[in-house]
Amino acid sequence: MRALVFTILLGSCAALVAASEPSAETATSLGLALKAEAVSAGEQVVLKEVATLSDIADEKRIVLEAIAIGRSAQPGQNRAFTQADVVAALRKAGYIAPVNPQGASAVTVTAALERISGKQFADTASAAVRAYFEKDSDLDAVVEITSVPTDLFLRPGEFTLEAELPESGARPGAQSVRVRVMQDERRVADPVVGVKVKLSGPVQVAAEKMFAGDLLSETNIKVLRKEMNANDFLNRTNASKLIGMRAKKSINADEPLAKTSFAMPQVIKRGDAVTVYVKRGGLELTTRGEARGDAALDEAVRVLVADSNAEVIARASGSREVTLDDPIARKRN
């Protein structure tokens, strides 16, 4: 964008200079005093930064002072321009009147710079991580910076810093946070900050040891405030919603209660005598059978039907009850 604006400005300067400049034979010489040292704030070094003009009307001075002499060096570095370089730039821009260069034979131009310290990047990353966790008022996050990027030097101008957390979000433990640096609507850098997060908050845990098959009740739930690891944080759940479900494995006292550790309670066990409901259209028939496996509510289970001695796959529909749904109705639905 800056390059486009500069190109348009340069074209305007050339047109205005050429249209308003008298012939070389009748024009008064342009007084130009070159500085020995100068500082450039942009990507292009312009005349007003390296020289002072005299014997010229103000309106034309503004146009001439905007003429580019050459590209600036990298921020903090310098580049030299001679009197001949300055005169050549004027000619290229369309200024044909005599030029009387004075002052230094050459000017050393240092490109201005703006310093963004590594600490600024670290502070940006730290604040973003804390904000991520503390959206939940029950959580307390302590963020330790483990690695700080080097300072960054830019050309002067407004810039913004924004931390980019992973799509999955931050987590307890060590991780990296990228900081996006924007200047003039361009992404100019993305340094990485190393952080380590210590997170504490309330965790619902088992009040006492539970065994596989035990049903979770309200008395099995206890709340502890503790430091969380990544698994604790990612597997947090509202244990009250698991009440009535069965443990799939043994759970030690004070172990966090995770949804993955529970399943629907079994309503049928292998060997149970079960009532078999057979639905056919508007009819419902009842017979007896024997379960060939365990099943929770709505799970499939194999059943040996007593009347026909045939093994079928039914749906567990209640305690020691299975249903053979109407296949026509299922297809229609």
Image: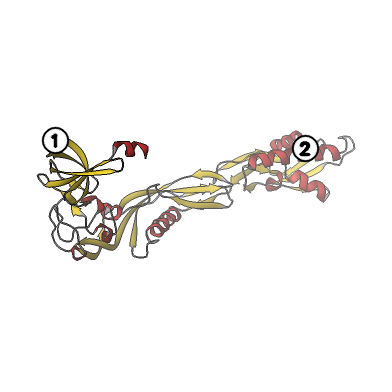
> Residue most toward the left?
271
The tag earlier along the polypeptide, 1 or 2, is 2
Relative to residue 198, is residue 192 drawn left or right? Answer: right
Q: CA distance from mark 1 to mark 2?
A: 102 Å
Within the image, what quadrant is residue 276 found in?
top left
Where does the image place residue 50, in percent across and percent down from the top left? 68, 46
Q: Which one is in front, 221 or 119?
A: 221
For label 2, the crowd category at 10 Å Cα-Cα, with few meaning under 14, some 14 to 19 and many 20 or more, is some
- At mark 1, the secondary structure is loop
The quarter of the picture where the C terminus appears is: top left
- At mark 2, the secondary structure is helix
Name the disc covering residue 179, or none.
none
Q: Is residue 217 visible?
A: yes
Label 2: which residue? Answer: 14
Rendered residue at 81%/50% (across/down): 58
Where does the image place residue 153, in percent across and percent down from the top left? 51, 48
Callout 2, which amino acid? Answer: Ala
Q: Is residue 248 visible?
A: no
Label 1: which residue? Answer: 308
Where does the image place residue 316, in percent across and percent down from the top left? 21, 46
- Tell whether label 2 touches label 1 (CB within 8 Å): no
Within the image, what quadrant is residue 302 found in?
top left
Q: Which one is in front, 5 or 331?
A: 331
Tell me: residue 34, above or below residue 135: above
